[in-house]
Amino acid sequence: MKNRAVCDGFDYKYLASKTESYTGAEIVNVCNEAAFQLITEDMECKSPVFTLQHMNNALKSIFPRTTNEMLNFYQKFHAKYGSRSFSNKGDN
């Protein structure tokens, strides 16, 4: 929602609760779908302001694809290997 106008009182906590099992990319898709809906409503973009209704409508068509099995795999992987950062510096 960075750089996007939202209505007064936009409930980010509510939106977060509705997208708890979504990946970052899936949340981006939800925001993009909401943007398409907003443009459809206001083709001239006179007042492009997102509401929770736009987001709820987008959530009806964008679903999380990460399964519990995938989450369990990543949690076990993280427990075993932790967070690591890899760099190619010096590798030629």
Image (spheres, rainbow, N blue to C red):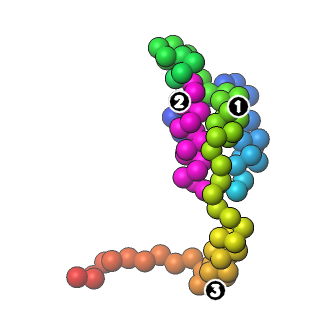
Q: Main secondary structure of the magenta part?
A: helix
Task: Identify the residue at the far bottom of this view.
Answer: 80
Q: Which residues are magenta?
A: 23-38
Residue 3 lies, in percent from the top left, at 51, 34
Instruction: Say what secondary structure mark 2 lies in.
Output: helix
Q: Measuring 65% from the left and 70% from the top, which residue is drawn there?
A: 70
First in sequence, mark 3 or 2: give its number.
2
Location of mark 3 (residue): 80
Q: Does 35 appear in magenta? A: yes
The image quadrant that residue 89 belongs to is bottom left
Q: Looking at numbered disc 2 in the image, what kind of residue is underneath it?
A: Phe
Q: Decide: is 43 above or below 74.
A: above
28 to the left or right of 59: left
Question: Of 22 and 89, which appears nearest the observer?
Answer: 22
Of the two numbered discs 3 and 2 in the rendering, the one whose residue sits closer to the viewer: 2
Q: Which mark is residue 73?
A: none
Location of mark 2 (residue): 36
Q: Does 21 appear in magenta? A: no
Q: CA distance from mark 3 to mark 1?
A: 39 Å
Residue 48 lies, in percent from the top left, at 55, 21
